[in-house]
Amino acid sequence: MNDLFWRDTGTGRPLVLLHGGFVDHHMWDDQIPVLASRYRVITPDARGHGRSANATEPFRFTDDLAALLRRLGTGPATLVGVSMGAGIAVDTALEHPELVGAVVVSGAGTNEPYFTDPWTTQAMAAWHSAMAAGDLDLSVEAFTLLAAGPHRTLGELDPDVVNRLRRMARGTMSKHTSDEPNWLVPVHDAWARVAKIEIPVLAINGAIDSPDHIGMAERLTGTVANGRAISIDGTAHYPNMERPDIFNEILEDFLRTL
């Protein structure tokens, strides 16, 4: 645990904000001060991301999170995750159910994603080829393009959001090399097991995110016993960064029902 970074702010019921892949806890900068006035807000950097150390042996993100929650003595927490963070939240509801009271996802259903729509498969291929070539600048740019979604260019997004994403992506990507071992151990059969999740699950999607990302989140909320999905107009893969006011309002409305 000593090689992992997290912030622990505020008091009250525990609320854990889980960032997406290749970014860090700063993607929640518009949520932390608002939510910490009423909740205990815990924002970790996943292993290999942000200020957390890279892996040196096999690990699972969900086990890192469970160890952190046990160390902090938090009872069942509400886990809120975007993209990879959403997958970690669902993995933890499956693997460590005693630690999770509710789950909020955005732009993902599990950490077993699948991509079929042409825009997403093309954008992902461009990003992965840049990473494989070890081209940091191209990797950052290809990754950031995913934030626009299939219907916009980056120029149509708030420049502050784009710059924050570039800064976080560069920080995390620069910690890695294309030839390093991949120590991440996946959680298997998540899609086959999510029907057993009985706690409340809410999806807050960007309405103009890719059909794959929206579809996976809606598949999750349609499969669990107690799920529903809502979309934020004019936002794509990072609705919490693009429209924090609306995201925070939807999230707080959900938290009041628990």
Image: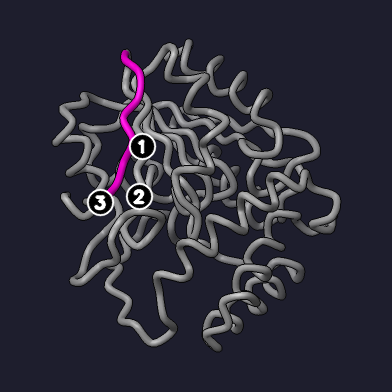
Left or right: 235 as drawn, with respect to 82 = right
Q: Are marks 1 and 2 in contact (CB under 8 Å)?
A: yes
Looking at the image, which residue is at 55% across and 23% down? 251
Answer with mark 1 or mark 3, whichever residue precedes in sequence.
3
Left or right: 154 as drawn, with respect to 241 = right
Residue type (three-letter) at the residue carrying disc 2: Arg
Question: Residue 221, percent across and down?
Answer: 53, 38
Looking at the image, residue 134 lies above or below residue 121: below
The label number, if any, that marks residue 193 in the structure image: 2
Boundaries of the magenta span: 5-11
Left or right: 23 as drawn, with respect to 230 = left
The label number, if any, that marks residue 4 in the structure image: 3
Answer with mark 2 or mark 3, whichever residue precedes in sequence.
3
Residue 68 lies in the magenta stretch: no
Residue annotated with mark 1: 197
State which quadrant residue 246 falls in. Answer: top right
Kindly state the secondary structure of the residue where label 1 is placed.
Answer: loop
Disc 1 or disc 3, which is closer to the eye?
3
Question: Residue 239, percent across and down?
Answer: 66, 39
Looking at the image, which residue is at 69% across and 41% down? 206
Camera-side residue of 157 and 67? 157
**Residue at mark 1 to residue at mark 2: CA–CA distance:** 8 Å
Disc 2 packing (10 Å; few <14; some 14–19; many ≥20): few
Q: Are marks 1 and 3 in contact (CB under 8 Å)?
A: no
Disc 2 or disc 3, which is closer to the eye?
3
Disc 1 packing (10 Å; few <14; some 14–19; many ≥20): many
Question: Residue 183, percent across and down?
Answer: 27, 73
Quadrant of the frame with the C terminus? top left
Camera-side residue of 73 and 137? 137
Kindly state the secondary structure of the residue where label 2 is placed.
Answer: helix
